[in-house]
Amino acid sequence: MSALIVDIILWGSVAALGLMAWQRGRPVLVSSVREGTLDFINIVPRIALGVIGAGYIAAVIPSEMITGWLGPDSGWLGVLMATVAGAATPGGPVIGFSLGAVAMKAGAGPPQVIAYVTAWALFAFQRLILWEIPFMPARFVWFRAAVSLPFPFVAAAIAMAIGKP
């Protein structure tokens, strides 16, 4: 049911934005449809590859390994390993979220997966080096990463306190 609500909200948002573009004139509507279509054509194959690749990873990695290292009983050591793995995971959301989903399906604990995704989102090493440092001073980037370091652990602690989703 919640997926249906999310779908309705997303489609409603797209319809509202389309109406706004239409009100601004035909050139804006045509341009937005063209740009959206090109983005769709470029992104869909990447999403498909990421999801299919995640399925291969799920088939190749023994679930005993996932449950042993990142399972619900791995505790804070599992959270630490998930945080390091998240920071070391290269790639965009298709890779990061797909690997998180694979870990969940293979038996990883929710706090560990939350720590993984949070670390990946906040300070993936390759993103720091390839994207952030070229655009911002390195001192600032490393400071931001250091300040962000506790967040995967805080998120995991909150997940542990709340319980299984």
Image (spheres, helix red, strand yellow):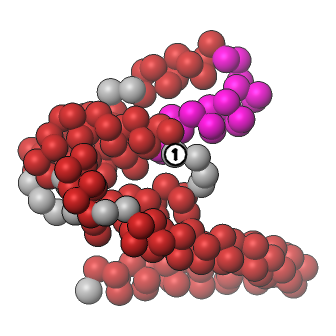
> Looking at the picture, how far across and down is residue 83, in whole percent?
36, 38
- Which residue is label 1 attached to? 89
117 and 17: which one is in front?
Answer: 117
* Residue drawn at (49%, 78%) of the image: 10
* Residue drawn at (12%, 59%) of the image: 164
> Looking at the picture, how far across and down is residue 156, in whole percent?
23, 42
How many marks the image carries: the answer is 1
- Report which quarter residue 146 is drawn in: top left
Q: Is residue 156 magenta?
A: no
> Looking at the picture, how far across and down is residue 34, in whole percent?
84, 80
**Left or right: where 119 falls relative to 109:** right
Q: Secondary structure at mark 1?
A: loop
Amino acid under label 1? Answer: Thr
- Report which quarter residue 6 is drawn in: bottom left
Disc 1 crowd rating (10 Å Cα; few below 14, some 14-19, many 20+) is: many
Does residue 57 show up?
yes
**Left or right: where 162 falls relative to 96:** left
- Report which quarter residue 22 is drawn in: bottom right
- The residues colored magenta run 120-138
**Left or right: where 24 falls relative to 80:** right
Q: Quadrant for the C terminus, please.
A: bottom left
* Residue drawn at (39%, 26%) of the image: 149
